[in-house]
Image: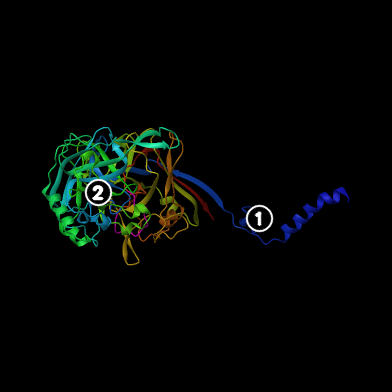
Amino acid sequence: MNWLTSRCAPVVALSALALASCDKGTDLNVDLPNTTTISTEYTEYKTPLLDVATVRTASVQSLKTDHYLVGRLTDNVAGTTEARAYLNVVTASSNDSLPSKLGQPVLDSVVLVMGFDKVNGSSATPVRFDVSNLQAPLDERQPYNSASATAKGALLGQNLMSRLDRTTVVATDTSTRPVTTSKVADPTIRLVLQRSGAVASPFAPAPAVSSAFFSNLFSTLKGSGMAFTQAQLDRELKGLAIEPSQGFSSAIVSFGRSYNGRLAFFFHDAAVAAPVAPARRRWRSYSVFLGPIYSSGGAAPARDPRYYTQMSSNLAGTDLSRLSDVTQAVASITLNGTSYVQEGVGLSTRVTLKGLETLMNTPGLIINRAELRVPVKPFSNALFPNPRYIYAVEADANNKVLQRVVNFLPTDRIVQADGRNQLLVGSRALGELEGPSSQQYYTLVITNYLQAYLNDKLGGNPASLLLVPDSSPLLASSTEPSTLTLGLNRAVIDAANVSLRVYYSKR
């Protein structure tokens, strides 16, 4: 074959294909005769065209989240934050473990056992909690959030103490002799509500803790026969309120789905023929469960008994003290160029868009890409880690979250992801934390939202956008899907460098 012909054949074929094509010049991003010229431009809005401040929402969703929180903690930003847990209880133990199965059951102790996976504050200081009965179980039809109040009944235990730095010994290699063991953390608190006095090793010294309430409840368990029903439990124990004791302010503990919380009754059978030394006595137990017990095993959270966390922050004496009034805001300049976003307590960064009139009044404007870039101040998360995601919700001039009716339900007006109808819900636009630890930032893409904003297609434009952590849904009434998580993660935002970057074209 002729070398020149073989080399040129592909070029000739490609030229013929190009001439036969019907693509317009603009489809190929080049200018050809009889096509419309498109120019792409870029602009960036920063302070003072973006007004950035810190605000506080009245409440966040805390019903049936993956964690419930208990404790009290003071820091120089949010003042004193306090968390109390309110929980319904269920009879989830096997009936075979009931004390009524024994000949002469004797109560030894009642212990509230809860596993935790996070401590905000000091884990070296033992916690001190108060435990109370509820006046009535949490209502299955009533919404609860971090601002909800629940009436307490009788006090069941006061100033109950438990360590947060417990360890336990586990076998790491059973093939060796002796078995190889190691010491690992035991993230479990145990609050003793009732106990018979122990005078023999290995439990001594363990002074008696008396409780007429649990002695009576154990009598009910002994007389329950073949089964102990939920109705019987509800008559005796309406639920539990767990709160930090007065004077305790060193930590807030997060109790999650890694370990089932339970109220355990430990007892033995005194009808055994020969007396048994306490060290060799066979203890039995019956448990009443609370918290996310079914979802911890992979079931739907809807099956869990009701529980929620009540959160409060005393901002007196801090730079955010004026946020005791949720209609107020603290300008970033007052906070040395910073703003805050924090889970649980409702701290949000408010961004007010200014100077968009030029874009609004430009005919034939097409937004190619718009993004809010939110930098985090480096090395500012020693006490609380940064939230992994943020999202944006619309608010009025008083920082109240705006709502619209979707499918006959009032729903928070949340900025939706690109490609989604901004008047609906179901896919919020998320900004993920990116970058190295020395220069981290969130990028929230709002291309479709800004186009709708400029074209007045939102059913009325908001006064501002609130940037909130993704794990803190603001309202229980919102139909927006959520991860149902609750924590205290906090980001310190470099407010002076928050920017809105807009790439746009004009025909």
Extreme-bottom residue of the structure: 408
Q: Is residue 476 magenta?
A: yes
Marks 2 and 1, how far apart in space?
87 Å
Q: Which residues are magenta?
A: 475-485
CB contact under 8 Å: marks 2 and 1: no
Q: Nearer the viewer, residue 453 or 426?
A: 426
Instruction: Tell me which residue sits at (78%, 53%) in the image.
Output: 10
User: What secondary structure prevails in the magenta region?
Assistant: loop
Look at the numbered disc 2 and give the secondary structure of its residue. strand
Q: Is residue 183 left or right of residue 447?
A: left
The amino acid pointed to by label 2 is Arg
Q: Nearer the viewer, residue 36 or 486?
A: 486
Q: Quadrant of the C terminus?
A: bottom right
The amino acid pointed to by label 1 is Leu
Residue 238 position in % (x across, y down) = 18, 56
Mark 2, residues whose alpha carbon is within 10 Å: few (<14), some, or many (≥20)? some
- Mark 2 — residue? 284
Q: Is residue 211 left or right of residue 39?
A: left
Residue 192 visible, this orientation:
yes
Residue 327 visible, this orientation:
no
Quadrant of res 373: top left
Position of residue 72 relative to residue 357, above or below, is: above
Q: Is residue 129 left or right of residue 184?
A: left
Residue 7 position in % (x across, y down) = 82, 49
Residue 202 position in % (x across, y down) = 23, 35
- Number of numbered discs visible in the structure rendering: 2
- Mark 1 — residue? 32
Q: Is residue 76 magenta?
A: no
- Labels 2, 1: front one: 2
First of labels 2, 1 by sequence position: 1
Q: Nearer the viewer, residue 431 or 472?
A: 472
Look at the numbered disc 1 and give the secondary structure of its residue. loop
